[in-house]
Amino acid sequence: MQHTSGNSQSPRLAVLVSGHARGSNLQSLIDAYNAGILATSVVLVIGTNSDCKALERAQAAGIETIVISPNKPGRTDEGYGECISKALIRRNVDIVCLLGYMRRLPTHVVTNFKYRILNIHPSLLPLFGGQGMYGHNVHAAVIESGVKVTGVTVHLVDEDYDTGPILIQRVVDVLDEDTPETLAARVLECEHRAIVDAVRLVAETGIKIVGRRVVKSSTLISQEQSN
Ligand code: GRF
């Protein structure tokens, strides 16, 4: 599969958030672009709820925002997915980042943007992932388990929770005195760097998907054919 931007311009990035997302990872992408560290700009942020700090951050940066509610009366999951896909396609979006999007993404979007959707998760997947594993729950489970390291995973999105091919992982020590809150704060700092690195890898360096592995490639996004 070939990247579809179809011209020499920088890839166009959209960010999806849900609920009252705080938007600190979005802010990291905005800051990296403004600092010239990232050539890929966020052109659209889609939320599920208008009362949302992430949407405020986007608006302050002059980025278009839209709200698509999955709970609109009469709207099915398929219909919700179609609305998201249409909004992304209409704006020629190349890459999508789920940054604080705590829902299963509708199949319609996953299929339309196969291997072009990234999710960030605050643990070293496949550990401490899956439905219900977000925020405090993740860090409390990490401490409870006794592991000495945790971290950040950025992965490509498939149709399940936290199961797609892994792009980037970064390790964070679990300290004896950690609480879920102190650990979450250190992991979040690490997320802010990891998401920028992951977007650069996918949108600017190039990746190839070989089975479950993601490796660097000179083509922006490609998949090795299986025999
Ligand atoms: C992050 O911890 C991320 O790992 C998870 O949701 C949180 C979003 O934080 N998927 P923010 O809204 O980017 O501050």
Image: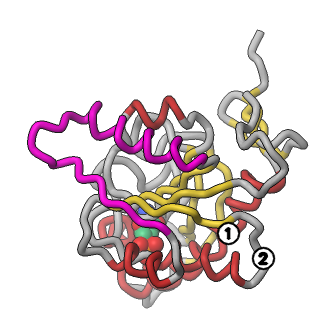
Q: CA distance from mark 1 to mark 2?
A: 8 Å
Mark 2 residue type: Ile
The outermost residue toward the front is 90
Does 193 lie within the magenta span?
Answer: no
The outermost residue toward the top is 227
Instruction: Where is residue 202? Give x, y as percent.
Output: 72, 51
**Quarter in which the N terminus is drawn:** top right
Mark 1 residue type: Val
Image height check: is 106 above or below 43? above
Which segment did they paint magenta?
Answer: 64-92
**Quarter in which the C terminus is drawn:** top right
Front position in the image: 210 or 126:
210
Q: Who's the residue at 55% across and 37% down the image?
A: 113
Q: Regarding ligand 1, which quadrant of the image does it lie in?
A: bottom left
Instruction: Examine the image and state in which quarter residue 21 appears.
Output: bottom left
Secondary structure found at label 1: helix
Q: Is residue 99 left or right of residue 180?
A: right
Instruction: Where is residue 131? Give x, y as percent.
Output: 31, 48
Residue that carries the numbered disc 2 in the rendered image: 37
Q: Which dot marks residue 196?
A: 1
Label 2, residues with CA under 10 Å away: few <14, some 14-19, many ≥20: few
Q: Is residue 195 left or right of residue 163?
A: right
Q: Is residue 119 left or right of residue 199?
A: left
Question: Which label's residue is closer to the chain start, 1 or 2?
Answer: 2
Front position in the image: 119 or 49:
49
The yes-or-no answer for disc 2 within 8 Å of ligand 1 is: no
Does 68 lie within the magenta span?
Answer: yes
Front position in the image: 152 or 95:
95
